[in-house]
Image (cartoon, rainbow, N blue to C red):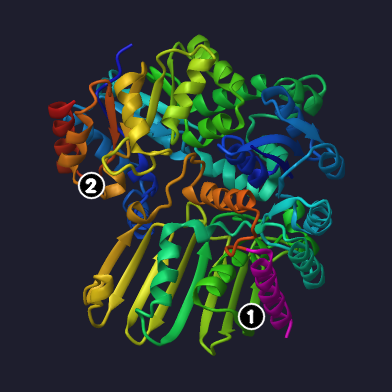
Amino acid sequence: MLKAGIIGLGKMGISHAAIVAPHKDVELVAVCDTSSLVLEGFRKFTTVRVYDDFKKMIDTEALDFVVIATPTKFHFPMVKYALEKGIHTFCEKPFSLTIREGEELVSLADRKNLVNQVGYHNHFIGTFRELKRLLQKGVLGELVHFTGEAYGPVVTKPKGGTWRSDPGEGGGCLFDYASHVINLIQEIIGRPVRAEGAMLKKIYSRDVEDAVYSVLKLESGLTGILSVNWSDETYRKMSTSLTVIGKKGKIICDATELKIYLKAPDSSEKLDRGWTIKYITDLAIPVDFYLRGEEYSAQIDNFVNDVLNGKPGNINTFRQGLETDRVMELIMAESKI
Amino acid sequence: MKIDKVLFGDNQFFAVNHLSDEKSREQAIRFKDDSAIIRVLDQAIDVGINTFMCTTHDRIANICDHMRANPDRYSNFNIYPGMPYAHKYANAVTELGIIGTIKQYVPGNIFGTFAKGGMAFISKDFIKLMEIFIDAEMKMFRGINTPVIFIQNVVVDLILGLKAYDAFHAYDEYIRKEYNAEPGYITMNMPALLDALNSIGIKNPVICSSINKIGFRMSGGKEIYENYLREKEFRPIAMQVLAAGALRPKEAIEYLGNFPRIESVLFGASSKAHIKETKELIEQYL
């Protein structure tokens, strides 16, 4: 059995704890947070040991891996400490507040040959995975355009706030919502290398952006649009989608379905001319424990398997997380012009 | 306590569609007004359905007002509430954090509710906090028959994952004592939940979980679900029987007929014809 610890018990950290604890190959031994209320809850209702100091937890417990789900500004010191102690590390997204710190963590993980993963969970949703496979096979032919979108109802009225309202701490829509979409574009379509025009718009928040709009240019020269808004209450929850247009057709993909339009049939993929719809019911990744979506368990399964094999994997690596941070930096710089 | 064989659900009213975000939007448009929801509920009643199972969504409060105002039509009608409406809290936690969410949603002033010591007091009494949340969510159902009260899967599965089983115990006791109702559990992890409840002495629980021919949202696989449905003692309610629309109603419900222990089926539909068809299939095969 692997021994695990969780640092940061907000929404994501508690959710990770509930997924890690029942995992058949893992024993959740300790959790760490600064909220005495949350720690008291764990002390009362669970058997895990609780800490309010992450260094003490790492030094005291013989952990095989940690999950770090604290606000972004704490990722660097915590990930660094864990890696230096030889502990495999899963870190929530976005990866790092600054590129320099991110680079240091990437090279440290490489040097130590430790398993490292960032929580871009959309890659564990069957529809997005299928989109990547179809694009790699070239079903759309030469690509001409893409649109990456995410909308949801996080900030829907004027309000002061929490750490999420501080632009210096990665609290806005760019880091929280847009990072998911940028990472999907980067890993499924291609790596963005330029932002050709970008806007960070405040809608209800006082200090941070509520919407992100940008034209992104990829390594391949392909351009497309990023459109993200977390102040849109016409959505019940965060809804993320990619639309990719090629010379042979078009695919619209979200977490529930994949709508494929082809100008001519593709016999090797059994796709007709015109529309074909593929549903998540056929594409979901099977999991042993479900909380909020298969993808959250599937990403932990992937990480745990890599730890068991003692070999860093290739989905959502720190390096990929850092690439996404770079794109966010491009967008921030461009938005100031 | 008998549970109705046919339970009418509310996902279609609140733009919950597990197969298509586009479909969700169409539903949100169609059910913009409460009267549209009431019209469909009345159609369900007209074909002989007696129970509405719903989340504690804000708009359900309006439906409850309508029911209280028309006792002749609804006095024998049951609601099985499922709490909480999780997205309300999830979106709030993203923005406000955990303490901020408690402050926003616990009625009155949280520090007033816990007269002495505020937060410090809460931290010693989570069970009391849970009871306050339950009472807040149940307020809208005052005067309406709620013979079974469910906790939603997000909360059930969170407690299950954290192995915080005492919370189940407290919930079970409070619902029986305070509401004179049967506690129910919605889950995406039925076998693990049943084991957990049995381990703390909760016998023969009402468990609502995905049960469908293609194993969609049946964590751990279809086989273990089928074994539990055949061999274990509990009161299963089947949901997601159409696997979000991947199965045709007849084959979907015929499959449920293989498991005599299944007491009821939860389903949602927006047209009278679909409601009637599904109800008749359930009565035929179950």
Chain bearing mark 2: B
What range of the chain is rendered magenta? A317-337
Chain bearing mark 1: A
Mark 1, residues whose alpha carbon is within 10 Å: few (<14), some, or many (≥20)?
many
Q: Position of residue A288 (x, y in %)?
A: 47, 40
Q: Which residue is mark 2?
A: B247
The main secondary structure of the magenta stretch is: helix
Residue A91, quarter of picture? bottom right
Q: Check the picture and name the quadrant holding the N terminus of chain A.
A: top right
Label 2, label 1: how far apart the Cα atoms are: 44 Å
Q: Residue furthest bottom?
A: A221
Q: Check the picture and name the quadrant holding the C terminus of chain A.
A: bottom right
Task: Please give left or right for residue B253 compared with residue A94 in the image.
Answer: left
What type is the residue that disc 2 sits on?
Leu
Q: Which residue is mark 1?
A: A198
Q: At 52% from the left edge and 28% from the top edge, which residue is drawn?
A: B137
Residue B136, quarter of picture? top right
**Residue A324 lies in the magenta stretch:** yes
Q: At 73% from the left edge and 33% from the top edge, which residue is drawn?
A: A38
Q: Position of residue A28 (x, y in %)?
A: 67, 36
The residue nearer to you, when weighing A1 against A10, is: A1
Residue A103, above or below B76: below
Determine which of the numbered discs, if any, sits on residue B62 in the image.
Answer: none
Q: At 46% from the left edge and 44% from the top edge, which residue is drawn?
A: A287
Q: Position of residue A335 (x, y in %)?
A: 69, 80
